[in-house]
Image (cartoon, coloured by chain):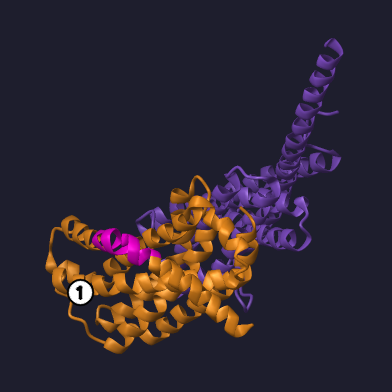
Chain colours: A purple, B orange
Amino acid sequence: MTHTTSSKGTRVLGFLSLIGIGWVVALGLFMSPDDFVQGDLVRIMYVHVPMAWLMYLSFGITAVGSAMYLWRRSQWWDLVAASSAEIGVLLCGLALVTGSIWGRPTWGSYWEWGDARLVSTLVLFLIFVGYLAVRQIPAESHLRSRRSAIVGLIGAVNIPLVHFSVEWWRTLHQDATILTPDFDPKLDDLMLFTLFLAMVVGTLLYSWMLLHRFRMAWLEEQLLEYSLDDAIDSRRAEATTQEVIS
Amino acid sequence: MGSSLLSESLLVFRKDLQIERRSRVAMAQVAPFAFLVLIIFAFSLDGDLATLKRLTSGLYWIAVLFSALLIIQRAFTLESQDGVRDALRLSGLHPNAIFLGKTAAIFLQIVVIEILLGLGVVVFYSAELTGWGLLLATAAVAPVGIAAAGTLYGVLTAGLRVKETLLPILLLPALAPLLIAATRTSGSALGEVAVNGWSWFNFLAIFALLYVGLGLIAFTPLLEES
């Protein structure tokens, strides 16, 4: 019995992430050049863009996990959805914060209502904060799972609605740098490499966090089950001893 | 089957309206609350008619949304008392009929509030109602979306101890696109903003259809639990 949620695999993953973070810091903060227009400010991109990408990945996994739970009714998928949503909300919050920090010197304000993606990300953040709130409500395990799965799926359906409405409402965001239809990166080679590396490292780190969070959630569920069994057993034992005494 | 779904929905619809007719909670409490919201906006915006007139559609829809929240809360408080929820499940009514009936009852109550608030903005904000076609279309379709989403999240939170606080944080982000679209359509009808109101109206219609569809899919498993 080990007192840890790590395994050989996650240790390797964690180690690789750590090395990767060091590498990204070195490249991002020191070695990559300044941007022609934005100067040093461009460096925040190396954390902001991976966070935004991983946020979509984690909410995507939550949606898949929710759908799979409703289909298969397996607790495994429910806990995957839950773990991924927690990390997603964290990343979403960080993406908003880093975006604001970048926005202050660029736009002159922390918040810009004209930026559609900023606004829709905020709504997305609130939708999944709601999902986490639903998860926290004490209920029988399968009830909580089903309720959360439905909220998670409706949340996912909301994403395009929010996206289009806000996009249409206003728009000002930096055009997507990498995911433009005709791939025409305006970035220096080393900047582009740093960004890709940051995204790869971010994904490793995300996987590492997800595995640990999932194992923790799994253990919590087991603990709940076992402690109930234990309590029943000890009550039974009590009853038998009393019978013997009397 | 189709006709029985319709008649069962009507049954639930009439039940909710009858309770409202006897208790008069929506009329005696929600309607005054809606006016109160309009008046509080005027207080906080310095009672400046020019400002209020310019912001009419935004303030109007916020007042509608807040009042709708109360109506939805009320619609599910009804079901959580005295084991009504179990009674509904045991009644053999199809869950979709319950969804449609409750949505329709909430819809109708929101429409009444909309009309009252419409009078309110004319009187208190000296709004001049123009673009009647678009205004009426918006007033008819937006509450379908609000009522369908509200019924969906309402049943989800009904019976929970934290329902008063949980419903707004689930429902309001989901209704954010609707709020934008409704504000745009009525803003365009009133000449506040130069946008194509009818394209936003289409968005409202899609929103309403989507949530009615989601409700029909998700209501059965949601009602079974609790």
Q: Viewer-proximal residue, A104 or B111?
A: B111
Q: Where is residue B191 in the image (x, y as percent from the top left)?
A: 24, 82
Identify the main secondary structure in magenta: helix
* Quadrant where the N terminus of chain A is found in the figure: top right
Disc 1 residue type? Leu
Mark count = 1
Q: Give the quadrant of residue B187.
A: bottom left
Q: In this view, does A4 lie above or below A58?
A: above
Q: Give the quadrant of residue A236.
A: top right
**Can residue A175 be seen in the rendering of this structure?**
no
Q: Is residue B20 magenta?
A: yes
Q: Mark 1 points at which residue?
A: B119
Q: Position of residue A44 (x, y in %)?
A: 53, 52
**Can residue A149 be seen in the rendering of this structure?**
yes
Q: Mark 1 lies on which chain?
A: B
Q: Is residue A84 magenta?
A: no
Q: Viewer-proximal residue, B64 or B18?
A: B18
Taking B98 as reference, is A115 left or right? Answer: left
Q: Position of residue A146 (x, y in %)?
A: 67, 56
Q: What stretch is highlighted in magenta?
A: B19-33
| Residue lying furthest front | A246
Q: Viewer-proximal residue, B180 or B214?
A: B214
- Residue at 60 percent of width and 68 percent of height: B95
- Residue at 37 percent of width and 75 percent of height: B182
* Secondary structure of residue under mark 1: helix
Q: Position of residue B112 (x, y in %)?
A: 31, 73
Taking A158 as reference, is A171 left or right? Answer: left
- Residue at 61 percent of width and 48 percent of height: A86
* Quadrant where the C terminus of chain A is found in the figure: top right
